[in-house]
Amino acid sequence: MTEETFDVVVIGGGPVGENAADRAVRGGLRTALVDHERFGGECSYWACIPSKALLRPGNALAAARRLPGVPVGATIDPAKVFERRDSFTHGGDDASQVEWARGAGIDVVRGHARITGEREVTVDADRVLRARHAVVVCTGSVPKTPDIPGLDEVPVWGSREATTASEVPARLAVLGGGVVGVEMAQAWARLGARVDLVVSGPRPLPRYPEFAGDLVVAGLRADGVRVHLDSGLVRASEVDGAARLELTDGQTLTADKLLVATGRRPATDELGLESVGLKAGSTLAVDDTGLVSEVDGGWLYAAGDVTGRAPLTHQGKYAARAVGDVIAAKAAGEVVDTAPWSQYTSTADHYAVPQVVFTDPEVASVGLAAAEEGEPHRVVDVDIAVAGSALHADGYTGKARMVVDTEREVLVGVTFVGQDVAELLHSATIAVVGEVPLRRLWHAVPAFPTMSEVWLRLLETYGL
């Protein structure tokens, strides 16, 4: 058994952990970053990056087809798509991520980490890392597996298999109408699979405005995806190496692979939370500085999916930067300002979380998706029908929504749905975070002819 002392020990070497460790080091603290898989984490190798690499070629081909005179082929080349995807993930080699971390002054430790006491982390049962100031948990999340009879008997994909596979299944069934479900259904349909998407509700993406789910369904069906709404999986069984799937509506599907995309949960099962009085597998509730609320002593912090606050890579990185700065400031004896929107708080988690669903059409949203009951809010919906969108694609179809706090006349939510709307999102995020008065926003004149003209239409519809 070896022992070593650091100022900070960060568990989880994904983007969230990297940011927490980097900010702590910048604050003058010796910091260890521990991971048992690949440094760079889920997003780099199995989620955000490879999934978008799979989606982009199909989206580009569809966009080209909407412009007369652009020479395009009939299909995309899966082998070339997989080759490009693998170039982004370096074939699973994390050497460049390790090199970055070491170059940033972070001590890299590879192995399984468990919290074994106050300010104590044991790696692979034979190496103890002690933290003078803090331990930070950034272990992310893992897929939820529903309790369905026969599921363990059929060829199942999780999200990792769906983003890393290098052969196109002839028949793919996707269970779940969330972001992973709709993105992977469309990606693999455009790569050549016959896809069935099984959605439990009347439309996918239930956290978004209804028009978002409806437009995404239309886009999926245009690509040949068979969308089963208000449905579910009752039973699965293996038949000749394939999955036989019995749905709640009585239909039976046969698939070579079944992608289970039914949500995620915090990756805290093997973390040793019992040693500090918490339940294994539980969400780590934190305050806005990232301090774990249920552990005394002010030494345990968390950021990212494990907190359950805003389970998105960019929000986790944002929270991690605050955590690293808080720990460094406290270690230096500085007063930490925990007021909303300070350097040391992840206030945006409550009010301004941006997210993009990279389907075709794209869905981009920040803040509230609808008016909340009892609030002085007004919803304004318009079609994205401006000169910029008309030039962008023939027959452009899209919608935009803004939610306004009518007492303060500021935006509290914006949603865009349509081809290439992701690049509109940051302007909306700035408007929400900055609480820009609508009458001042009116003077932010959108360039002509761009899709940003939709801002003018939203404000005019509001009454300006």
Image (tube, rainbow, N blue to C red):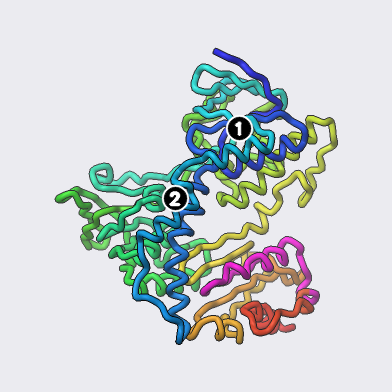
Q: Is 64 part of what is drawn in magenta? A: no
Rendered position, 33 above or below 220: above
Q: Is 437 part of what is drawn in magenta? A: yes
**Residue 193 in the image: x percent, y percent?**
30, 63
Q: Give the foreground label among 2 and 1.
A: 1
Residue 135 can be seen, yes or no: no
Residue farthest toward the top in the current orientation of the protein: 1
User: What residue would you read off at disc 2?
Assistant: 263
Q: Which residues are magenta?
A: 413-440
Q: Secondary structure at mark 1?
A: strand
Residue 16 can be seen, yes or no: yes
**Residue depicted at x 24% and y 54%:** 256
Question: 107 or 451: nearer the eye?
Answer: 107
Quadrant where the C terminus lies? bottom right
User: What residue would you read off at disc 1?
Assistant: 33
Residue farthest toward the right in the current orientation of the protein: 334
**Residue depicted at x 53% and y 29%:** 110
**Residue 349 in the image: x percent, y percent?**
65, 52
**Residue 259 in the image: x percent, y percent?**
34, 53
Amino acid type, callout 2: Gly
The numbered mark at residue 1 is: none
CA neighbours of label 1 inside 10 A, class few (<14), some (14 to 19), many (20+): many
Amino acid type, callout 1: Leu
Rendered position, 46 above or below 169: above
**Residue 172 in the image: x percent, y percent?**
29, 58
- In terms of image quadrants, where is residue 392? bottom right
Relative horizontal placement of residue 59, taking residue 76 as reference (left or right): right
